[in-house]
Image (tube, grey):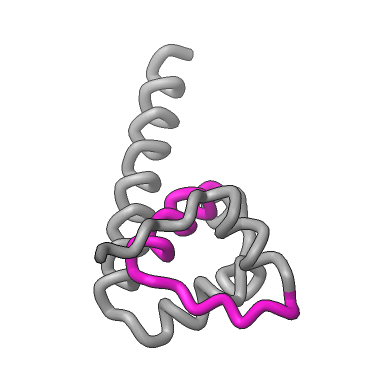
Amino acid sequence: MAKIPRPLWQLLLLTNDPKMPGKLTCEECIALLAYDTELLLDGAELDEIRPAINKHLSQCSKCQAKLASWLEKQYRMERFLDLHLEAEE
């Protein structure tokens, strides 16, 4: 029987509770990374985001690559928008 994935709200509650061990699957980690990428782009340090994500990232090269890819794409998009706005001025 397939395991039913936990909804994002439940993952957020679990990973913000220091009493919970919070072992994540790759799918759960990626869902939380999508949510927390904005925090990183706004200047938060990786150490400041959920410890469960950090733990998973330290052990999973697939998720490390996914995070790096998202950050690179987001940086390129922001840079493109900045250049476009500068050109309009």
| Most distant residue in the bottom direction | 59
- All told, the count of numbered labels is 0
Q: Position of residue 37 (x, y in %)?
A: 49, 53
Q: Position of residue 38 (x, y in %)?
A: 53, 47
Instruction: Decide which of 48, 21 is in the foreground and name it.
Output: 21
Q: Residue at x 27, y 69 (%)?
A: 65
Decide whether residue 28 is among the magenta residues. Answer: yes
Decide whether residue 47 is among the magenta residues. Answer: no
Q: Main secondary structure of the magenta part?
A: helix
Q: Position of residue 60 (x, y in %)?
A: 32, 81
Q: Residue at x 32, y 70 (%)?
A: 63
Horizontal arrangement in the rendering, residue 2 relative to residue 30 (left or right): left
Q: Is residue 56 above or below residue 41?
A: below
Q: Is residue 60 above or below residue 89?
A: below
Q: Is residue 85 above or below residue 40?
A: above
Instruction: Decide which of 34, 6 is in the foreground and name it.
Output: 6
Q: Quadrant of residue 20?
A: bottom right
Q: Is residue 81 above or below residue 36?
A: above
Q: Position of residue 52 (x, y in %)?
A: 55, 75
- The quarter of the image holding the N terminus is bottom left
Q: Residue at x 66, y 69 (%)?
A: 48
| Most distant residue in the front direction | 1
**Highlighted magenta segment, given as a residue range:** 18-38
Q: Residue at x 33, y 69 (%)?
A: 26
Q: Quadrant of residue 50?
A: bottom right
